[in-house]
Image (cartoon, rainbow, N blue to C red):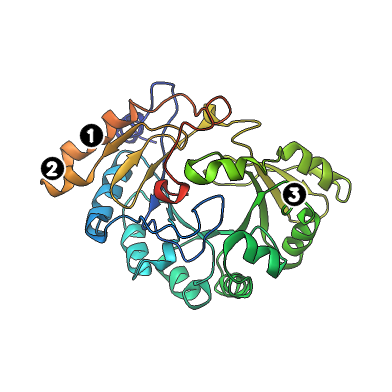
Amino acid sequence: MNDTNDDKLATLVDPFGRRIEYVRLSVTDKCNMRCFYCMPKGFRDFEQKQHWLTFDEIERVIRAFTELGVGRVRLTGGEPLVRKNIAELSRRLTALPGLDDLSLSTNAVLLDKQAEELAQAGISRINVSLDSLNPKKFEDITGGALQPVLDGLMAAREAGLSPIKINMVAMRGINDDEFVDMVDFCLQHGFTLRFIETMPMGATGEKANNHYLDLQKVKQQLAQSFELIPGVMPGGGPARYVQVKNTHLRIGFITPISQHFCESCNRVRLSVDGTLYLCLGQDDKVELRPLLRDGISDDDLKQVLIDAISLKPEKHEFKDKPHQVVRLMSMTGG
């Protein structure tokens, strides 16, 4: 790599020596489900549409990030597929020089009809939220129906999206009897599986905390049914992986509470209203939308991003201050 690229990459290093190379981009705070740990039932306080970043504004911010060395972007929400013309945005972002990886997090309810177009638009891989394979339990958790999610998953596989990662929030007393079943499901269909600990965020945090489950216990439970060996998985996320021996299945564990991964954090989050959040579990942020609409230059925008990274905190404090973050996960971006 030449010196010029090294200089560009060095501009997005935070005060703790972490290189920021990954942006999680929320394109909407709306969702067609109501997972109880993410958004309260009946919640309607969504961001006004005129405050959403336009596709032009999104492209401009992401271009500034890529020119500063960011190579990974993940489209999130809310539920990103409820925003119209998301494939068009995907095509525009994948055309940016320096963007090596564009991925998507989704609940897959609308994926059945969009998977092929998204694949053609440059989405390389997807994460799908799926907390239960039991239709009644799935409805209790999400407020929605399971079958459209399964249809979406099969459409994504047919469209050639790979890897397809299943994200399962592990919840004591809710789905802790389904972990082996989910491993079998992923083995059958060639999916990757990732378990996630509940996080105390916003009005949903206390209820989620009541069902918190240390993922070490999940790993111990799985080890009784499967021979687990060390595994790795390419990507920009925080999961620690094992592999089921003699299979291609990798199982990841995302542990923001029991074993936080702050020391290797390489990401920031951009919300639908143009707020740049520097940590999922802190309130450090920079408002970009007013700057964009006041006509900030490209060079000044990049300087704002550089200055913002200098504000990135060392770590979240979910364990020590579980009520600190009052915004919902859906407002921040998953």
Cα distance between the residues tagged 3 and 2: 51 Å
Report x, y in % for residue 222.
Answer: 82, 47
Task: Decide which of 133, 87 is in the foreground and name it.
Answer: 133
Cα distance between the residues tagged 1 and 2: 10 Å
Is mark 3 in CB contact (under 8 Å) with mark 2? no
Visible residue check, residue 237? no
Is mark 1 in CB contact (under 8 Å) with mark 2? yes
**Residue denoted by label 1:** 304
Cα distance between the residues tagged 1 and 3: 45 Å
| 319 left or right, relative to 216 | left
| 301 left or right, relative to 33 | left
CA neighbours of label 3 inside 10 A, class few (<14), some (14 to 19), many (20+): few
Say which amino acid is labelled 2: Ile
100 w.r.t. 112: above or below? above
**Residue denoted by label 3:** 173
**Residue denoted by label 2:** 296
Say which amino acid is labelled 3: Gly
182 w.r.t. 257: above or below? below
Quarter occupied by residue 310 = top left
Visible residue check, residue 54? yes
